[in-house]
Amino acid sequence: MNELEVNVSVSVTTPEARDLTDRIKVAINGTRLMIKEAYTKRAWAALSYESWDAYCAAEFGDERLELTRDERRELVADLADTGLSVRAIASVTGDSHMTVQRDLRAGVTPTRESVTPEPRRVIGMDGKTYTQSVRPPEPQSDEDLFAGEDWVQPAEPEFERAATPPIAPARPRPEPVLLTLRTHTGAPVPYPKPQSKPTFNSTPGAGISWANWSWNPVTGCLHGCTYCYARELANSERLKAAYPVGFTPLFHEQRLDAPAHTVIPAEHRDDPAWRRVFVCSMADLYGRWVPQEWIDRVHASMLASPQWQYILLTKFPDRYVGLDMPPGAWVGTSVDEQKRVRIAERAFSEIRGAVKWLSLEPLLEPLEFTDLSMFDWVVIGAQTQTQQPDGTVPGFAPPFEWVARIVAQARDAGCRVHLKPNLFDGRPGMQRIDEYPLTE
């Protein structure tokens, strides 16, 4: 045997190798697309993480992408074209900010005139849009080619072979700093300290169709409504880290400064929906079990940032009476059964607010109101199916007549009306009228 020959055992056929390679390419491309989608749709906010950094660290940990230099540069350039900032790219790849910046510069072709490339627009992890400049790379000599990279020049081999990057040691995960939160009974709950300033959560779906933000300084509820979507989320396995005590009421005082730190993206500053914030979408802030101190501190935070339209909702509207409300607050109550009608009418005859509204979601029975003129806005919706700890709760589509009767009464009272998307999208929809003439 010639000394330059190497005996290598091949255990895969050529078609199998080609199929495997093609599947790897599809998987890599799919990963890029999923990273883009998770960032642009603010998946970390939907999972109640305070930042993209915290989301990447908690969900992926050391399971970062192991790529060659060229593959990494291609991925970095691709993510940068989507609008990810240097910091956001570094979080998901596990590389340093300097490595990402160097990869971006490497993707800029230098010219004889050394023209400075145009700054690019990026979406920061706080939802704001920034201008980020990219410096052109300096011309490189052969000696400079591998400078600063995680590559090594191979020693003189006995035969021709390709250089391969060394295996980087796993980065130790720092121990999280723990806060001590309190339940409504005062029980302590350890909770990871957020790595960034608190902001509102974006709500792009149809579930909260009348606001673009939610804010949950309090989570959990003791109403025990069998259909509750919030209880479903809080008790789900995938959100266990965000809701360590499930749906037990918990005060997140670390989120109180979110109104001061949230910024509306520049392209949405003229859209009124981006000023609306649903307060405590995962709780009833005014439930009878909620300590008054929690309510007072949440209201103090709202009053300190009056630029938002805070949308409030409770099944205990009597607790609104006497509270100092933010100037643009939308004060609402939820009525799903006839027994709550009298409570709502009595309380709202005394309540003052910029907007007084009535939520009839889910509409579970035909409701009869004495007077709707005390409300400015009426919202009607169906009951969507949920997976509760004790099993599946099916959806319920209210009959068209129930909805039409409320709409007609609201119109007569001068109320604005909003029908939720779940009345029309078939999930579960509405029982539409489908009658035919009687024939002999």
Image (cartoon, rainbow, N blue to C red):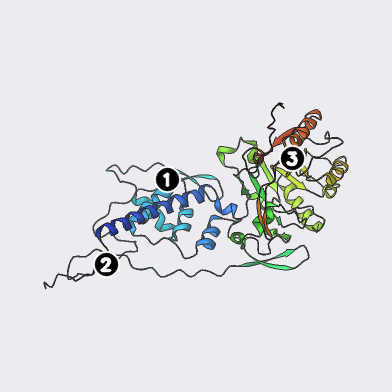
SS at mark 2 in the image: loop
244 or 342: nearer the viewer: 342
Give left or right: position of 91 versus 212.
left
Query: Looking at this rendering, what residue extends furthest in the front direction?
Result: 440
SS at mark 3 in the image: loop
Q: Residue at x 86, y 35 (%)?
A: 371
> Vertical placement of 316 versus 157: above or below?
above
> Vertical placement of 93 versus 266: above or below?
below
**Residue 250 placed where, x, y %?**
72, 61
Q: Residues within 10 Å of mark 3 (few under 14, many from 20)?
A: some
Q: Are marks 1 and 2 in contact (CB under 8 Å)?
A: no
Where is mark 1, residue-wise?
81
Where is mark 2, residue-wise?
11
Q: Residue at x 70, y 33 (%)?
A: 433
Give the residue type at disc 2.
Ser
**Residue 3 placed where, x, y %?**
13, 73
Query: Looking at this rendering, what residue extends furthest in the left direction?
Result: 2
Where is mark 3, residue-wise?
328
225 or 45: nearer the viewer: 225
Q: Residues within 10 Å of mark 2 (few under 14, many from 20)?
A: few
**Residue 357 placed where, x, y %?**
77, 39
Which of marks 3 and 1 precedes in the sequence?
Answer: 1
Q: Are marks 2 and 3 in contact (CB under 8 Å)?
A: no
50 or 28: nearer the viewer: 28
Give the residue type at disc 3.
Gly
Report the quarter where the N terminus lies: bottom left
Give the residue type at disc 1.
Asp
1 or 2: mark nearer the eye = 2
